[in-house]
Every structure is written in structure tokens, then in C-alpha cells.
Image (cartoon, coloured by chain):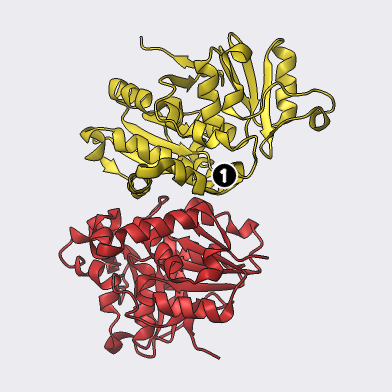
Chain colours: A red, B yellow
Amino acid sequence: MPHSIEVMFTPAEFELLPQRDLSQTMCIVFDVLRATSSMLTAIANGAQTIIPVAEITEALAMRQKVPGALLAGERNGFRITAQQTGGIEFDLGNSPREYTPERVRGKTIITTTTNGTRALRACAGAQTVLIGAFLNLQALVDWIQFTHPQDLLLVCGGTHDQAAYEDVLAAGALFDRLGATWKTGLTADSALMALKLYQMAQPNLSLALQTARNGQRLMGIPELMDDVAFCCRPDAVPLVAGLSPDGTIQRWEWA
Amino acid sequence: MPHSIEVMFTPAEFELLPQRDLSQTMCIVFDVLRATSSMLTAIANGAQTIIPVAEITEALAMRQKVPGALLAGERNGFRITAQQTGGIEFDLGNSPREYTPERVRGKTIITTTTNGTRALRACAGAQTVLIGAFLNLQALVDWIQFTHPQDLLLVCGGTHDQAAYEDVLAAGALFDRLGATWKTGLTADSALMALKLYQMAQPNLSLALQTARNGQRLMGIPELMDDVAFCCRPDAVPLVAGLSPDGTIQRWEWA
């Protein structure tokens, strides 16, 4: 059977994944601005485990079970405050630049993302679920070439219920780097479109990310504007991280 | 409030539309290869009304109520046969070239499309629902400029559960032709992506349609391959057709 590659642009699509047989499928979840970029940065800087949860209350409950864990997450771009939790200040926001070695080395991080967590949970039945961003493109490509999954599903986290341009670009960038095995397989129109969008944006990727709605929003917030360039550094974080059956995310090493 | 423009790539997205307030929204449904192209061709050639239905059994039941109506539709690209219905041969398939004036003038056409009908029904709560294709781009643009809806939602029919490149290109082509009012409004990333894909494909639109999965499939069937070029004739059918509250489609004339 030829390999297949498909891209999902929106939450509406990935929410239907639990109905689908993904036993031969590798899912890669992209939430470039900024959830998956932050996760990869945290792991590169020595964080041991990331526990993605959907709600603030879920994060607080999880923290009870994992003393010493850091609480991370944003609402409307900013770190969650004591006011929003009823007393507990979060340790980290969703800016990948906050996840420094000094702060995260050896730590477990409980992070509340909205679309990122929704996407990860929707993919839970897949053979493999990996964390994707521009930061680790080649590491993902190497992992794919080595493990050669039957089907590849690139899942864009999006924003609220809509598609996010930066996620589609990252999916297209990954496809662009894959070899002939994938280019000659069953290519869904969605993957073709992501590839074309990436190839068009590639000469000035940084500008493309600033054009995205999320990029525009971040560029308008002085403390966060540098995040856009930070998340737009292909291969700056050459590692693979994946979702374990227990719902946590760790670095995956070559066997 | 600024105007907004958004594109839906897949059935998973438009199936959620009934949950959304569309009272200020104009929806335009694109199913370029070939449902909406056939509908527009039929109306241009004098068909009076089109009744879209989802299933063959629904089409047969509707025919009982509307004697003299033509039965139209395809399964796997070909006209529905007597074998598939238990005895009744359909009058027309889904090739727009079949919808000649001799065959359709003055007629009611009951057509079973899958994604086209799903999309039209999902949009039923909208202020306005129009039929879109490359064939009537400028007519749609003129209608939009004249009626100036608050929000514009370009709904791509797709194929099975996936996005179809040709539908996204047509949505992008429409956006490309809209004026500054729309370009400076709230542009969803989905609309930006459709626009970019169209602008890239525009120098050889016919080749782009042949690259789409649906285009490839049609190009592989000698009797149907000419449909691709037929559906790729911008403004060849300069009319607007819309969905009435009773679920039927007619030509809409300027008041």
C-alpha cells in the first residue's frame, strides 16, 4: 500500500479523529504560535515531562498530584494570574523564551493550552503522536524516515475554531523535506495545499508568520513580539518529543 | 463593524454551521468538480428549479411529488443506473456538459449530490446562500458589492471528508476579485490561504485543476476528462443562483 499524507487544518476536523482507525498513522501536532514551540523549548532546556491539560482547574488539580511541578499556560496571550485561579500564580506563560534551563531543568510542567491539548487528545488513538514546530522539522523528518509509518497525518492546532496559517506552513515545510516515498504516495489535496503555501512563504518565512492572525496579534504586544521570530527558527531545537500512553510528553531518544 | 471573510475547507467545518448565528452572513457554496458547475450550467440553459437531495431514495421519492422532473446525479462519477435504483434510469449524470438547453429548458431537476447537498443544508440558516463556481465568479462579486453582506463565508464542498483543492481555488479567486472593503476587513487565515493558493495557481488554472485529486480522477476517465476544462472557464455562466427557504435553487435576478 502506498504511503499517505494528509493535513488537517482545523479543530472541526481533528475532533472527528476518535472515529477513525489511526493504528497505522503517525500524527504530528503543530501549534506553532506558541504551544508546541514552547513544549519543545522546555524539553530542550531539560524539562523532564510535560503534562498538557485543557482547563485551569484541571491544571490546579494535577498540581496537587505532582508536587513541585511548574504550572504553565496563558489566557489571551498572558500568563495566568492569581486572580484567574483564585490565588495561585502560574509559574510560566506560553512564551517559549520563558522556558529557560534555569527555570525548567529536571522539572515536570503542567501546561494548559486550549487547541494544543484538544489536538493531542484527539490523536490519542494513533500509532504515534509527535510534537511539531518549525524548531524541530529535520528531527521529525529523520524520525519519519527511520520509523517509516504507513500514514502521516499533520494536525494543525488552529486558533479557536479556525485554521491558523503558521500551523499549515509548518505542516507544508515538513512535507517539503520528506523524500520521494511520500511525494509519490497518496497525497491528499490538503497536503498539496500546505506544501504550496509553504513553498510560496519560504523565501520570507518570518514575514509570513507575522501576516498570520496570531502573528499579527503577538506583534502588537511589545513583551510578546519576539516570540514570533523565536518560533520561526527551523531546526533550532533538534529533538523529537512524543505523547506517551499516559498522556504526558517526553523527549524520545533513538533506540 | 468591519466586514469579515472566511473560508471553510472541509465538511467537518461546515457541518458545525447549524450551531452558528449566520443571520448576517452570506454563504457561497463551491463544489467546482462538478456539482455547482453543473447546477449553474443547467440554470443558464433554462432549467427552472433545482432540488438538491442527498440520497438516491430521496431523489426517487421527490420525483413522485414532482412529475416531469428530471433525475440527475452520479455515483463514482457516472450517471445513476437502473440497477442502482431498482429500475429507474436517471436522466442526467453530473457532467455539466450534459445539461444542454434541449434537455433542461423549463425543467425541474432533482439532483443527488453528496457534499454539495450537505454543504447547502448546513448553510440553511444563513442570510443568503449562493451557488459558486469559476463559471460565475464576477456575477457573484457584483452581487456581493450590491447587497454588501456583513460577513462572507466561502464554503468548500470538498470530497468525502477531505478538502478539495479546486474548491479552495475558486474561493480564493472570488476573494481576489473583491475590493478593498473586503481586503481591509477581518480576514481569517483560511481566506488568506485560499487567496494565496489561487494567486499562485492563476497563471495556469487549468493545470491546477488537473492536479487536484478530483481533477486527476476525471482526467483518467475518457468520457469525463473534458469536464475539467469545462468547469475551468471563469465567467462563462454570468448568473447568480441561490437557495430558497424551501430548499430549492433558482436563478436570482437583480430587483
* Along the line of sight, the residue nearer the viewer: B54 or A45: B54
Q: Residue at x 41, y 78 (%)?
A: A138
Q: Residue at x 38, y 29 (%)?
A: B137
Mark 1 = which residue?
A: B214
| Screen quadrant of the N terminus of chain B | top left
- Disc 1: CA contacts within 10 A as few (<14), some (14-19) or many (>=20): many
The answer to whether residue B165 is above or below residue A156 is above
Q: Which amino acid type corresponds to the residue marked 1 in the rendered image?
A: Asn
* Along the line of sight, the residue nearer the viewer: A236 or B13: A236
Element carrying mark 1: helix
Residue B76 in sight here: yes
Where does the image place residue B95, in percent across and percent down from the top left?
60, 29
**Direction from residue B227 to residue A11 in the image, left or right:** left
Residue B9 in sight here: no
The answer to whether residue A223 is above or below residue B31 is below
| The quarter of the displayed image where residue B176 is located | top left
Where does the image place residue B99, in percent across and percent down from the top left?
59, 21
Question: Numbered disc 1: what chain?
Answer: B
Where does the image place residue A20, in percent across and percent down from the top left?
64, 58
